[in-house]
Image: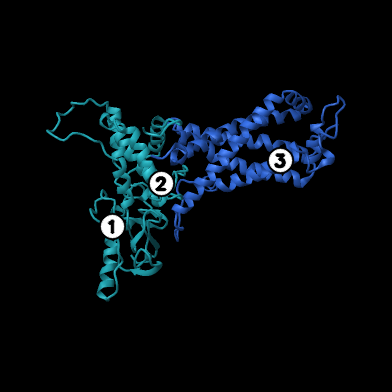
Chain colours: A blue, B cyan
């Protein structure tokens, strides 16, 4: 008999669970980001990096989670493409959404964006002159606020972030409710509520994330 | 009324097919869709042309053989209806209608609109049964079953195995069919004995037969002529969770 990681449902469950881990992460991440509006981003970053154990455990967990999610999503999608021999001359979708049919592509966009985002704000190699590691604030902490505001004053940078967040919102719009269905942690009564909550959560996350580039682009947050 | 039909014509499994245009004249709105095709075929036969090959059996909406995708929707535009129960009053004079077979790798086209749905039989053979001793007929109510459980089981048993769920699924997945069969048995005491083995065997056979994986598009529920719900797929997923231990072989 096949093993869990060869089974159809088992692999889907791994994608669902790892997806839910990432959703938890991006909720914490958006809360951390919001400190920029209250002038607390440098303090938040300094505090976070004074806890290397927490940072590294999170990094290791997230790398594992992302690897599993990406690997099985691609494998399952390739199988699904193989099972569908070609499209109908006329096709009319009744229940599926643009989001549900394009999970692999929104996922690919998010993955590509993640690499850019890490190079941009973690490794800080895209705009070295704005790098937080190279600019200290008055209290001698890496000036993350300066890095973020200077970066987002560039239209192209902001657009990349906003576009990636559209992909993220679409991915979550289907992904959140789908993960509950795959794990079987729903029923007919809770499903409409889960679907609505998933949609609301993806909109809230979208607005929470794009707020920073949008507000900076509008010149409402200028730094010192 | 008069209609223009574009029908998928394919000589055999290995030959390429194409859409061919036919005219359907003097169609009565009271005809069923299959009766309309009968009339078109009679006309074709009279003129020594090859008729359109399509599958049909009961013509009362319970056999599940009429595997036609009509204007992009399996079994046509009317909800919870098989093709034989779809009437021409659902169409207007002058309409153009596209008729195609189920498209899924696991359902190869035999001819025109007829597909081979043996893959469903293989899924059933892999575990869609209960092993019971034969003998005398057991007394009614000898095994008490809660009304709610019996209702859910009977709702799942409504599946006629027509394959519309696979035809509608962008992944060509047979999860709704498999889930209906698994729920049907898993809700009943007789089915609980082999429940763990069954869910593993049937989902494995589903993959082996070339069906895709469910990614929760829910097209299947919309297309199902019997209103089988995707909540049964969640039930299948829960049955799978009960059956597997990540550290050992599933279903053992």
Rounded to the nearest angstrom, the CA distance separating label 3 from label 2 is 37 Å
Residue assigned mark 3? A117
Tell me if A42 is positioned left or right of A210 in this view: right
Image quadrant in which you'd find residue A132: top right
Residue B129 screen position, x and y as percent: 27, 39
Residue A31 screen position, x and y as percent: 67, 28
Q: What numbered label is drawn on residue B125?
A: none
Q: Secondary structure at mark 2?
A: helix
Task: Identify the residue at the far right of this view.
Answer: A138
CB contact under 8 Å: marks 1 and 3 = no
Q: Please name the residue shown 39% across and 62% down the image.
A: B97
Q: Is residue B132 above or below residue B29?
A: above
Q: Please name the residue shown 31% across and 38% down the image.
A: B156
Q: Please name the residue shown 85% across and 33% down the image.
A: A135
Q: Is residue B138 visible?
A: yes
Neighbourhood count class around disc 1 (C-alpha, 10 Å): few under 14, some 14–19, many 20 upward: many
Chain on which label 3 sits: A
Residue assigned mark 1? B32
Q: Secondary structure at mark 1?
A: loop
Residue A67 screen position, x and y as percent: 59, 39
Neighbourhood count class around disc 3 (C-alpha, 10 Å): few under 14, some 14–19, many 20 upward: some
Residue assigned mark 2? B207
């Amino acid at each position: 008999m096949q093993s869990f990681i060869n089974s159809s449902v088992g692999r889907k469950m791994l994608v669902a669970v790892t997806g839910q881990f990432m959703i938890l992460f991006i909720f914490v991440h958006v809360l951390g980001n919001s400190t920029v509006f209250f002038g607390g981003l440098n303090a938040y970053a300094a505090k976070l990096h004074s806890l290397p154990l927490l940072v590294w455990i999170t990094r290791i967990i997230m790398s594992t989670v992302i690897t599993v999610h990406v690997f099985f999503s691609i494998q399952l999608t390739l199988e699904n493409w193989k099972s569908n021999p070609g499209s109908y001359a006329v096709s009319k979708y009744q229940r599926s959404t643009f989001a549900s049919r394009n999970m692999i592509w929104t996922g690919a966009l998010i993955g590509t964006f993640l690499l850019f985002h890490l190079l941009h704000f973690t490794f800080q190699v895209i705009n070295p002159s704005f790098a937080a590691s190279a600019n200290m604030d008055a209290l001698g902490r890496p000036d993350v606020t300066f890095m973020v505001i200077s970066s987002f004053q560039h239209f192209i940078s902001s657009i990349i972030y906003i576009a990636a967040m559209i992909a993220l919102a679409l991915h979550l719009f289907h992904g959140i409710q789908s993960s509950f269905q795959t794990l079987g942690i729903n029923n007919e009564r809770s499903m409409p509520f889960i679907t609505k909550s998933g949609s609301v959560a993806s909109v809230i996350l979208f607005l929470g994330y794009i707020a920073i580039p949008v507000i900076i682009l509008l010149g409402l947050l200028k730094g010192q | 009324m008069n209609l223009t039909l574009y029908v998928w014509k394919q000589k055999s499994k290995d030959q390429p097919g194409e859409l061919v245009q036919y005219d359907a004249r003097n169609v009565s709105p009271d005809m069923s869709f299959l009766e309309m095709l009968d009339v078109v075929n009679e006309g074709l036969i009279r003129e020594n042309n090859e008729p359109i090959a399509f599958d049909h059996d009961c013509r009362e909406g319970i056999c599940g053989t009429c595997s036609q995708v009509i204007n992009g929707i399996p079994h046509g535009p009317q909800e919870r209806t098989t093709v034989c129960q779809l009437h021409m009053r659902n169409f207007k004079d002058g309409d153009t209608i596209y008729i195609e077979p189920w498209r899924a790798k696991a359902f190869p086209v035999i001819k025109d609109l007829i597909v081979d749905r043996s893959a469903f039989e293989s899924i059933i053979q892999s575990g869609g049964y209960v092993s019971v001793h034969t003998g005398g007929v057991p007394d009614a109510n000898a095994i008490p079953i809660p009304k709610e459980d019996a209702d859910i089981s009977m709702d799942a048993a409504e599946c006629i195995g027509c394959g519309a769920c696979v035809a509608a699924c962008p992944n060509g997945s047979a999860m709704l069919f498999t889930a209906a069969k698994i729920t049907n048995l898993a809700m009943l005491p007789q089915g609980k004995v082999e429940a763990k083995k069954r869910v593993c065997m049937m989902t494995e056979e589903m993959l082996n037969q070339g069906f895709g994986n469910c990614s929760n598009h829910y097209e299947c529920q919309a297309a199902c002529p019997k209103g089988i719900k995707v909540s049964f797929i969640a039930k299948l997923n829960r049955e799978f969770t009960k059956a597997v231990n990540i550290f050992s072989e599933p279903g053992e």
